[in-house]
Image (cartoon, rainbow, N blue to C red):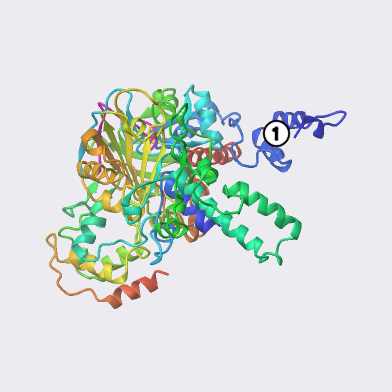
């Protein structure tokens, strides 16, 4: 009961959602009034522009208020792909986990995009296996 | 239940409660009432009475949203020396209202100047108050804030699926009547085919069959079909008239398979959920009214525009360091015996706080959810004039998700502000990634698929993305059952001389009532510690 009601409550109260409390799983049989569980965008650029930019901003420069969102532009922490893969998959602090809303392929795509744009030049591809391992480790 | 049922020669139940209340205080009275079967749906136990503070005891309260305001108010009433520190240049936190003339700036720097007409507004945060949120209602009453009904369920509003019915919105009343009618017809068919003999007695089957006929608006053959019987529920295609006007005509029900495939039946459950059941309210004139009224009594102890940079403690007291939020300069410190900290966990995870490693781990584990609201001002109330929708919510699977019509000012000529977007989940991100100006455009674009009048009647809009809210970095703590199991108690328990409060420390996340109940619980525990030290 709680599993079904809790998301509805939280969502429409003011709203609160995340991987485990998101809409019901996708069904090929019907549409979904609660919205889509997964992000529709598949390529890295669309995912960045449709998801990451909400906080890290379209220019990837982040921003500050009472707290801050770090800039992804010119960010040396992106040099090792495992770090951004871990952040996107499992989340940390204000950064939500996207393991319930992005597939391994989507995570690899968006991390690759950020690592090769906004002044970052880390061209080595993000292995799908790495995402899989991080996802397993986060369980 | 009549009084007579409970009467004993010497003592009525009500007198018993009153006695318990007088002797042991509100919470004992509440517990007694609960155990005797009253008051089971709320944990608010009436105005708090902490009793006297230890002489000279002081508390610094961080954050002037609901939890901070309640804490500061009640602790001062108890005799504590209180200071209230707030990041924004106003009190109320997420319980805010944007009106014409207001300027709002999101994290990232985009500034909007709202140009709504006088009296029109957007509540970008909380916007509804259920009848059983007794804490909220009590504070509204104590501070003279008027409330009015919020229309949660409007049978004439729409349910809309972009991929079904040719994109044409369906009336809620039709979806409701048709889903109920089809289910009743199917179940009655099962009974009449003797397929329920195993689980329901013959007598009950007979009564159930009769009930289904009435409940589902079935005809004499237990069928849910077009005609007057179903039209009395779903509404008529040609309405009833007078004199020699055309005779009323009932429309064709939506097929069960279409209700299921489009998923629009799901919208029926929203208003049936306890938190949104009728009666549900909104404060007259905007959600900021009650916090403002409370804040007005605390101005002498409130510091606004203060960005907290450190919260330190030792065995003697708490030291809070802050700078001017506008300049980042002018560092100052406040010292107190105790601290009630209502800052969002997203913020606490990023500042220098002296608490246990377990509590810090909890700060790091919890992100805040995405949500976007957009208010649109239109030249006329076409939803009333053309669509006959007075208040309530249209539900859609478009990214805007909800369109809510004002629950006030009905049937007046002139302008109105509609909530054109209330998005959450994956659709919220898509919109949250846009500039506020583009979110307004998107709301008009999407909404015009349901109300074609949007494009010609739209005047001006304002939008708020909670992930770009500088003071929260999200709309509310995204708890899961697992996170709650791991971190909730650690966060809720007093840590040295610091106690946390807020809706994130309640079972009512994202509700104002959650913040109120959390604050009342936190200050009660803090007070017990303070008087026993």
Q: Is residue B357 above or below residue B153?
A: below
Q: Position of residue B513 (x, y in %)?
A: 50, 39
Image quarter hosting the C terminus of chain B: top right
**Residue ID for mark 1:** B24
Q: Is residue B335 visible?
A: yes
- Residue in the picture at 14% in, 66% down: A116
**Residue A88 is inside the magenta segment:** no
- The answer to which of B253 and B526 lies nearer the viewer is B253
Q: Is residue B173 above or below residue A70?
A: above
Q: Residue furthest front?
A: B244
- The answer to which of B157 and B328 lies nearer the viewer is B157
Q: Which residues are magenta?
A: B90-107
- Residue in the picture at 51% in, 29% down: B139
Q: Is residue B167 above or below residue B109?
A: below
Q: Position of residue B169 (x, y in %)?
A: 36, 47
Question: What secondary structure predominates along the stretch shown in magenta?
Answer: loop
Q: Is residue A16 above or below residue B378?
A: below
């Amino acid at each position: 009961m709680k599993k079904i009601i809790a998301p509805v409550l939280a969502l429409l109260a003011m709203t609160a959602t995340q991987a485990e409390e998101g809409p019901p799983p996708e069904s090929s049989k019907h549409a979904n009034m609660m919205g889509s569980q997964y992000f529709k965008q598949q390529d890295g650029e669309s995912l960045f522009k449709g998801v990451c930019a909400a906080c890290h901003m379209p220019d990837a420069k982040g921003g500050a208020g009472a707290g801050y969102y770090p800039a992804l532009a010119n960010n040396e922490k992106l040099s090792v792909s495992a770090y951004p893969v871990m952040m996107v998959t499992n989340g940390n602090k204000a950064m939500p986990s996207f393991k319930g809303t992005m597939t391994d392929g989507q995570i690899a795509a968006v991390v690759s995009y950020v690592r090769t744009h906004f002044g970052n030049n880390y061209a080595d591809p993000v292995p799908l296996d790495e995402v899989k391992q991080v996802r397993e480790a986060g369980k | 239940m009549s009084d007579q049922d409970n009467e004993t020669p010497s003592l009525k139940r009500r007198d018993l409660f009153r006695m318990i209340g007088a002797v042991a205080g509100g919470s004992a009275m509440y517990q007694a009432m609960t155990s005797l079967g009253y008051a089971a749906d709320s944990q608010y136990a009436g105005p708090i009475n902490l009793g006297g503070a230890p002489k000279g005891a002081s508390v610094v309260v961080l954050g002037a949203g609901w939890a901070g305001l309640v804490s500061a108010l009640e602790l001062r009433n108890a005799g504590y020396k209180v200071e209230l520190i707030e990041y924004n240049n106003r009190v109320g936190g997420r319980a805010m209202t944007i009106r014409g003339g207001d300027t709002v700036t999101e994290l990232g720097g985009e500034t909007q100047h709202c140009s709504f007409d006088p009296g029109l507004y957007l509540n970008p945060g909380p916007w509804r108050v259920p009848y059983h949120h007794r804490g909220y209602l009590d504070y509204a009453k104590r501070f003279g804030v008027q409330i009015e009904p919020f229309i949660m369920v409007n049978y004439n509003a729409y349910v809309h699926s972009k991929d079904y019915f040719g994109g044409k919105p369906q009336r809620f009343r039709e979806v409701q009547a048709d889903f109920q009618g089809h289910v009743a017809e199917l179940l009655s068919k099962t009974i009449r085919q003797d397929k329920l003999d195993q689980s329901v007695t013959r007598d009950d089957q007979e009564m159930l069959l009769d009930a289904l006929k009435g409940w589902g608006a079935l005809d004499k053959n237990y069928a849910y079909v077009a005609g007057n019987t179903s039209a009395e529920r779903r509404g008529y295609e040609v309405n009833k008239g007078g004199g020699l006007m055309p005779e009323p005509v009932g429309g064709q029900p939506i097929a069960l398979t279409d209700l299921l495939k489009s998923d629009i039946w799901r919208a029926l459950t929203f208003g049936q959920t306890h938190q949104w059941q009728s009666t549900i309210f909104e404060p007259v004139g905007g959600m900021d009214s009650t916090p403002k009224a409370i804040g007005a009594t605390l101005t002498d102890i409130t510091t606004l525009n203060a960005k907290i940079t450190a919260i330190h403690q030792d065995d003697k007291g708490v030291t809070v360091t802050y700078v001017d939020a506008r300049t980042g300069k002018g560092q100052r410190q406040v010292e107190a015996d105790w601290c009630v900290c209502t800052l969002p966990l997203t913020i606490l995870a990023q500042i220098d706080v002296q608490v246990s490693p377990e509590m810090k781990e909890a700060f790091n584990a919890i992100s805040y959810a995405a949500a976007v609201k957009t208010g649109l001002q239109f030249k006329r109330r076409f939803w009333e004039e053309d669509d006959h929708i007075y208040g309530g919510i249209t539900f859609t699977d478009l990214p805007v998700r909800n369109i809510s019509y004002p629950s006030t000012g009905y049937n007046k000529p002139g302008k109105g502000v509609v909530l054109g977007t209330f998005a959450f989940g994956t659709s919220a991100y898509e919109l949250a990634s846009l500039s506020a100006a583009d979110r307004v455009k998107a709301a008009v674009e999407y909404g015009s698929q349901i109300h074609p009048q949007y494009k010609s009647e739209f005047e001006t809009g304002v939008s708020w993305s909670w992930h770009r809210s500088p003071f929260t970095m999200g709309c509310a703590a995204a708890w899961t059952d697992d996170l709650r199991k791991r971190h909730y108690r650690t966060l809720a328990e007093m840590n040295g001389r610091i106690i946390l409060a807020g809706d994130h420390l309640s079972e009512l996340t994202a509700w104002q009532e959650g913040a109120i109940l959390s604050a009342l619980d936190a200050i009660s525990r803090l007070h017990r510690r303070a008087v026993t030290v």
